[in-house]
Amino acid sequence: MFYYNNQVSGKDAVLTFRRFARKSYAVFSSLGREVHVGVLAVSTLACAHNAVLASRSDSLEIVQQKMSDSELPVATVSGRLPLSPEKSAYMVDVITREEIEKAHVQSINDLLKLCTNIDVRQRGAFGIQTDIGVGGGTFEQICILLNGVCINNPQSGHLTADFPVGPMDIERIEVYDGASARSFGSQALNGAINIITRQEKQTDTSIGLQAGSYGTIGAAMASHISSQRVVHHASAGGLRSDGAVDNSDFTKLRAFYQGTGRWKDVQADWQAGYSGQRFGANIFYSAAYPDQWERTNRIFLSGGCNWRIGSFHLQPRLSWTRSYDHFQLIRHTHTGENFHRGDVLTGELGVYWDWLAGRTAIGGEVRKESILSTNLGRPTDDVQHVEGHKDILYDKKDHRYQSTCYLEHKAQISNVMMSGGFLLLHNSTGANRFAFCPGVNVSWKPLSSVKLYASWNRSMRLPSFTDLYYKSPTQEGNKDLRPEKMNTMKLGVEYSCHGLSASLQSSYRHGKDMIDWVMYSPDDIFHSTQFALDNWELLWKGKADFCSLMPSQSWLESLDMSCMYNYQTKKEGAEVYKSNYSLEYLRWKIRGGIHFRFFQHLQVSGYVSWQKRMGGYLDASQGAANQYTKFSPYAVADIKLSWDARPCSLFLSLENVGNHKYFDYGNVPQPGFVCLGGVSVRF
């Protein structure tokens, strides 16, 4: 089946088609007219047999030149050494654009639930106050990147997942499970997630509207403007809801811009983003206070380039993030009110080059993290007024510097890929100011369809300002916290052939000085403390692509299943009555998805997930705030329907169709059945 994409009108118009599908009902109905296939990869021509070309001694050079001139985009695995997935020694999970379009979610946080080894814990619906962890780790132990730029918030990891982009902006999401400091910096203690935004070659604009349960209304817009050398992408969106439970109403706004350009040997990119939300925080942080409220805002800027000088690639980059946080323990009052302003300024310079022994990268980074607050930091006489509140002062502040240098090398010998290196870090405050984080990754392809992996990596993370300083009637920070340290060892195998793919990986993590907030007795408050942890993880994934396996059938597209098991043990320290984070890890997560297509335009997807979390919460539902209750396993099923007849598409999202009651955090109930519908138009 050829899908028609009209370019010009009229009797003699040339028809250009954008996709070819091998279906039983496919009919080539345009005979007698000139037909162009809009996306015909140059790699197809390069592999095709051509007697004239093959007879020439310089045929290979001709094909290589044609492929170079076409400037086809090549997907790369992120990190210090940009590599194609085939040449990478990493195991990387990727959420593709196709999976994003099928999911029809309202936030990136909901999108990340598609990845089995990611633990997504929500306090509010639709991505409000979401904590993201990987491999049994906490939300503080993962590095979140936007187009390769770290956007972690040093005030608290609770604020990191306030993204300036939405699902319609994203090309793919890369998930790195395990210590990744030498590839992504010190924030990647237990893993990293890199969000890659779209950069379309054509000029177009998309507008989307949605509405549904609990008075939820949203709108979004994305636009691409492409010229010969520069591509611009801009988007904006908003979402509001009355909330599924008392005091859970919210309003979200976001805006994002990215530009990329190429001039001879220089490829440059720059981006800017804004995210802001205000929400009823229900009993987010304490069951004793049901009327909490919070407002957060973040501004993000970055710019960098890849400058090729001979065989060397010079990569400078600057980024700046400013975040605001306003919290009220009792809404519309000054009780327990906090104001915070955080700044992160980062400068990085790296260089990589190819030579006989492989590809090598060296570089360094300087990162300054600072905070002004009414609660976090050290008392200061150099006070400043809180923005918009002339009668309130930032009377506490703190800052710190992190300086890192790294060396990494990749080599390939036959069908064995190896990469190794180290990160050397110095921080300006606290104990253990120097850290050495080495690592090595090896992969081997004994067959074209099979790939084996093994790796060992070490990483570290500095405590957040909240871990160090936060103090309230129910919580107390610890100024003497040491940096967390993690060692990760992994073994894995991947198989992919003829529409079938599967992977199995096992991981062992040993964590030292892991930070958690705990209670030692039922009448205690939460203390920020440290102890050692051991973690074992087993992850299996499988997928069947029926479009490749059985091209003759047309309705069933794909089926995927995955399972994760974690076992974590506390190795030292006093016995804990209640843990807030580290010991409330995800023990089991099993999920599956099935995708159908009917009548060419109708797509139906179904998702089922079941998970079991360790630990428990202090149940306040019966007025007994200190009644400890273990988390119960729960299953959630979602159905997504979409009708795509470009330029217009419709969707209907049915989430938690069983109306199951469950908890991700403490006493905070998650929404029951949610129905959302929407329309989008692409010009």
Image (cartoon, rainbow, N blue to C red):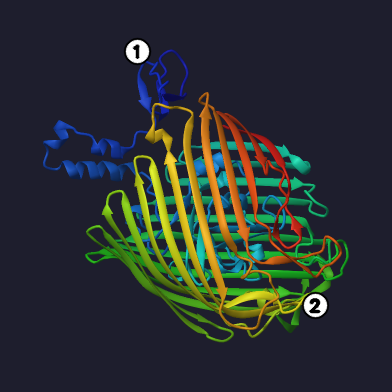
Tag 2 residue: 523
Of 220 and 2, nearer the camera is: 2
Residue 150 seen in the figure: no
With respect to residue 165, does 422 lie above or below?
A: below
Q: Amino acid at mark 2?
A: Asp
Q: Secondary structure at mark 1?
A: loop
Residue 595 seen in the figure: yes
Q: In the image, which disc is placed on residue 461?
A: none
Q: In the image, which disc is placed on residue 32?
A: 1
Give left or right: position of 126 versus 267: right
Q: Amino acid at mark 1?
A: Gly
Locate residue 395, reporting x and y percent: 77, 79
With respect to residue 359, does 674 lie above or below?
A: above
Locate residue 11, reporting x and y percent: 43, 12
With respect to residue 316, does 532 lie above or below?
A: below
Residue 528, by quadrant, is bottom right
